[in-house]
Amino acid sequence: ASSTSLMGAEHYPEPTAPPCPMEEVTIVVIEDRRDCISWVLNVLWVFNGGLQTAALWLVVGLLCCITIVGIPYGVRCFQISGFVMLPFGQRIVYMPSSSCTTFANIIWLPFGVLLALHHLLWGFICFVTIIGIPFSLQHLKLAQLSLWPFGCEVTPYTATSHSMLRTPFIV
């Protein structure tokens, strides 16, 4: 007998994997678009009404959370408070409103008017100093947000996506 037959080296067909279907996968790339100027303006913003305004949004959020019905409003106030601390380099994207968000915004309107007046006052103070015009524009953006806070998304990021085909991982 030969040595190859003893070692079991008989010729078997090559093992093949079953064909894998290709699936389309969307890859989302999120990148921070804030530059150095935005960060400098955000630091200066804290001294031009940003800290006081963020504290006001937190207090309103805590007041809303006292009742069970107000918890969604309080959570939204906390989210907006974080945006108020660093508004430069961020944007507000308004989504098409549904009847639920419109109803929530109408209920919110008494609080929203008070917060909008606060932002308009700070916006006027910053605008008068001329050097504070960029801060005034942020207060105007926040005044609009305080009137209609539901149905929008605040994001400092730009998301881009592209699709590609890949073979799924089979376990």
Image (cartoon, rainbow, N blue to C red):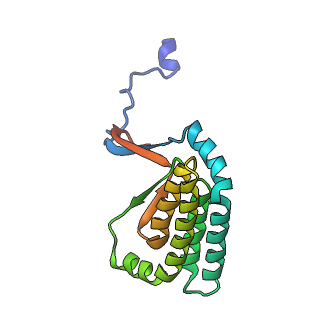
Which of the pair 136/2 is nearer the observer?
A: 136
Quarter where residue 28 is shown:
top left
Which of the pair 109/123 is nearer the observer?
A: 123
**Residue 158, image x, y percentages:** 44, 45
The mark total stands at: 0
**Residue 133, image x, y percentages:** 52, 51
Seen in the picture, residue 120 relative to 88 is either above or below; the reply is below
Q: Is residue 166 left or right of residue 40?
A: left
Quarter where residue 92 is shown:
bottom left
**Residue 125, image x, y percentages:** 58, 60
Seen in the picture, residue 18 relative to 103 is either above or below; the reply is above
Q: Is residue 157 left or right of residue 55?
A: left
Let me know if residue 12 appears in the view. Answer: yes
The residue lying at 50 percent from left, 51 percent from top is 90
Let me know if residue 27 appears in the view. Answer: no
The residue lying at 32 percent from left, 66 percent from top is 96
The residue lying at 37 percent from left, 39 percent from top is 167
**Residue 119, image x, y percentages:** 55, 66
The residue lying at 52 percent from left, 19 percent from top is 6
